[in-house]
Amino acid sequence: MTGTGYWIELFQAQQRLGGGFLITRRYVLTALHCLRGLATLDDRVDVVLADGSRLAGEVCRRDEEADLALIAIAGAYDVRLPIPRAGVAHGGDAWHGPYRPAAAEVHLRGQVDSGAAKYLCEGGAVIQALQLTVHQILGDYSGYSGGPVVKGVPGDHEPVVVGILLEQVPDRVAADRAANVLFAATIGEAMRRFDQFDVEHLLDVIDPAGSTPGQSRRARSVLQRTAKADPAQQEAEERDEPKVATVAAAAAAAESWFERIDEWSGRHILDPAQVAELKFTAAKAAIEGHTRGNSS
């Protein structure tokens, strides 16, 4: 069974910044406000796994309005910890948080009051969020931000991550305390916010040889659209035209499936875990078809 080793802690030098969790073996998801302690203009962080391993990472994306951040683990590290499935929570479901800010702190558990409802977060974005009741009355839950929200109770099934803890609700009677109500962005919301999970990124993951060294397909396509090639470069591109066309066809085929998968998702036929798996499969099939075409 997958353990709770997918949660992590973030440090810069000896300063603890906050929590997060592995959304893939390459990326860590956290709450952006957990990174407020970062030194100016320095995006480098240490990712400390549950087993104590310390890996180099870098903040690669920030979404200030949704209070989310994505951290890329340095390519030199091979993370072998199992990654939990992503899923969907519904009102009435039990939930728990495997991450806690210190060994002396309690683990949070409770009930999902409402699932995937629109919520105006403090950053200003309207996000798909889970409203959560917490059984443990602490008065302040700030240290738990960035941790995963897992469906069910500990140990009752394979972990299914349904959200990321973002905000606590102030107590209306005692303004200096938080009520036992939290809000969490859904996993689906987080994946929609970052283009690292779109088709061009997936093609780079599946077929890194197809990218220029040090440059992703996305970066290359942006440069091609915004820069005028010199005559020598144009001539080289024309010689390479069949290969470019084949790559474009592969991307187009994957994009077509992506649109269909998103349509099914919008009709609630698929949950976020199934969407992610199907998109990866579609991209893989497209690039394998491209590779076979080039070798023939």
Image (cartoon, rainbow, N blue to C red):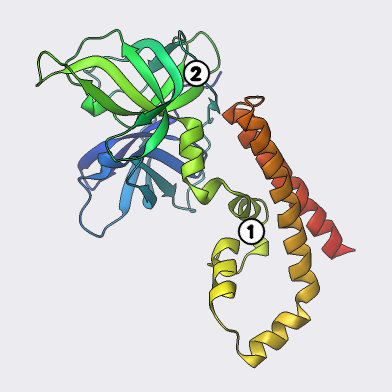
For the question of whether residue 46 can be seen, the reply is yes
Q: Is residue 259 left or right of residue 91?
A: right
Vertical order, 67 against 196 (above or below)? above
Q: What amino acid type should be assigned to the residue bearing mark 2?
A: Ala
Q: Nearer the viewer, residue 101 or 226?
A: 226
For the question of whether residue 144 can be seen, the reply is no
Where does the image place residue 112, in percent across and percent down from the top left? 41, 13
Where does the image place residue 174, in percent across and percent down from the top left? 9, 15
Vertical order, 295 against 230 (above or below)? above
Residue 120, by quadrant, is: top left
Q: Which mark is residue 89?
A: 2
Quadrant of image for the C terminus = bottom right
Q: Which mark is residue 208?
A: 1
Q: Earlier in the sequence, mark 2 or mark 1?
A: 2
Q: Nearer the viewer, residue 19 or 167?
A: 167
Q: Is residue 123 left or right of residue 82?
A: left
Q: CA distance from mark 2 to mark 1?
A: 35 Å
